Image (cartoon, rainbow, N blue to C red):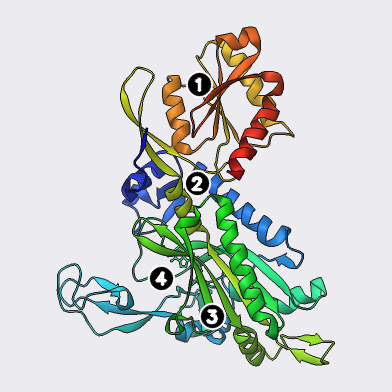
Amino acid sequence: MTSLNNQIDLEELASLAKRRGFVFQSSEIYGGLASTWDYGPLGVELKRKVKELWWNQFVIKQEHVFGLDSSIIMHPKVWDVSGHTSNFSDPLVECKQCNHRYRSDQLNTTVCPNCSGELSEPRLFNLMFKTFLGPVEDNTNTAYLRPETAQGIFVNFLNVKHTINRNPPFGIAQIGKSFRNEITTGNFIFRTREFEMMEMEFFVPPEEDEKWLNYWVTDAFNWYLKLGLSKNKLRIREHDKNELAHYAKATHDIEYLFPWGWGEIAGIANRTNYDLVAHSDQSGKELSYFDEATKQHVIPYVIEPSFGLDRVIMALLIEAYTQEDLVNSKGKQETRTSLKLSPLVAPVQVAILPLSKKEVLSKLAREIYTNLKSSEIVKPLVYYDETQSIGRRYRRQDEIGTPLCITVDFESLEDQSVTIRQRDSMIQTRVSVNILEEEIVSLLSNKAQS
Ligand code: GAP
């Protein structure tokens, strides 16, 4: 059995993602809309699990982190004060011949990569999506779709601080959509104009900023390992001074080795007190805490771990996508495609497959399915499938990353046992129905840890 995994064709991955219901092109029946994507039944589950794991790690397990769900459209002053209306832009160049547009900082040529035509001088292009509140489209009604969820946290700093009644260090976390009118998009769901972020602003006494920056960089890195990304495909890269965002003193990106090279999947920034100072000045509200030791009001520094959800999904799909050459039960050479997702994120964890549609088998298989669905011990997503040959059904489950398939056959009627087939090793073991739940829990948790 040889693995062909080191060279992944993104088109093949996108095609599997579509065929199996992970990701669809948006508005496809109208020809699609460039770089906008919809998540199908399995994509939704995958996303939901990643969000749940993130929330669990960065909110529930922490002593000092609290949740928020702020609005996408905020007072336009927020974006003036945060610096986004003046600084949140990329340098745009346009080909004078074919009118293709590029980010000049991402080009390593002085002519158009499409037609070798002459490029215009770079001009700054603001990435925020503009809209209008109410029916009148004039400057007094301008609003923006948020390009980051962070500002919703900064403007709620006092509200949350009063509610939780404590001083920094503490964090406020939220998960939600953000919008950026990117000049160049692409690589499937890697760079899109609408995407989901998982962000936390961790407010700290200014002198503790470096300690907490290191703490969250390590925590974020370990979280990716837990999801099943390989250590040798992850790295931490510190920003050079000239690439820091307008608000940052230091930033460490966590990057994943995508088929086209290293790409950012999260950034952990030391935003200092930039945002709170600016919002304090312009709103007239004191966004600070009272330090009992020094008897002074202090504006805290902020350490911000910021994760792109769609990029996590992209990395997970790439990491999991596996093609292997093997000899099937009829002695024929075939290529098996599977998603080797950790059970922690696999959209379906157990599939119940009666060997045939015969009623006697369906009856027992459905009984097992119903028991597992309502089980308090096993809480996996269980799927029932009796269509097509067993070989095809295994292939389907392999392609969606289901770690365990349970086959109910005619022998099961006699010995009350079923076959458990493990996705990665394809090992099959016979297990009594009496201990099936415990066996599933044990196999899934072993896999989650491996
Ligand atoms: N509040 C901090 C912030 O916005 P960022 O580095 O611009 O920082 C954070 O974005 C994360 O959001 C990135 O690490 C990336 O994972 C994700 N992200 C940014 N732009 C994206 C885009 N156009 N499409 C998909 N994900 C994106």
- Tag shown at residue 112: none
- The residue that disc 1 covers is 386
**Alpha carbon separation for disc pair 1 and 4:** 45 Å
Inter-mark Cα distance, 4 to 2:
24 Å
| x then y, percent, for residue 404 | 56, 31
| Mark 3 in CB contact with mark 2 (< 8 angstroms) | no
Amino acid residing under circle 2: Gly
- Residue beneath disc 4: 181
Marks 1, 3: nearer the viewer: 3
- Picture layout, residue 448 above or below residue 60: above
Mark 4 or mark 3, earlier in chain: 4
- Identity of the amino acid at label 1? Glu
Question: Percent from the top left, x then y, of residue 88?
Answer: 45, 80
User: Where is residue 123, by image quadrant?
Assistant: bottom left
- Circle 4 sits in a helix, a strand or a loop, which is it? loop
Pair 1/4: label in front: 1
Residue at 56% of width from left, 86% of height from top? 81
Cα separation, mark 1 vs mark 2, equals: 23 Å
In front of the other: 345 or 144: 345
User: Do the residues under discs 1 and 4 have CB atoms within 8 angstroms?
Assistant: no
* Location of residue 106 in the rendering, given as x and y in whole percent from the top left corner: 32, 73
The secondary structure type at the circle numbered 2 is helix
Position in image of residue 439 (x %, y %) = 66, 28
- Secondary structure under tag 3 reads strand
Q: Is residue 345 left or right of residue 370?
A: left
Which residue in the structure is indicated by mark 2?
A: 43
Q: Residue furthest top?
A: 414
The residue tagged 3 is 250
Do labels 1 and 3 touch, CB within 8 Å?
no
Disc 3 from disc 2: Cα separation? 34 Å
Q: Residues within 10 Å of mark 4 (few under 14, many from 20)?
A: some
How far apart, in angstroms, are the residues tagged by discs 4 and 3? 25 Å
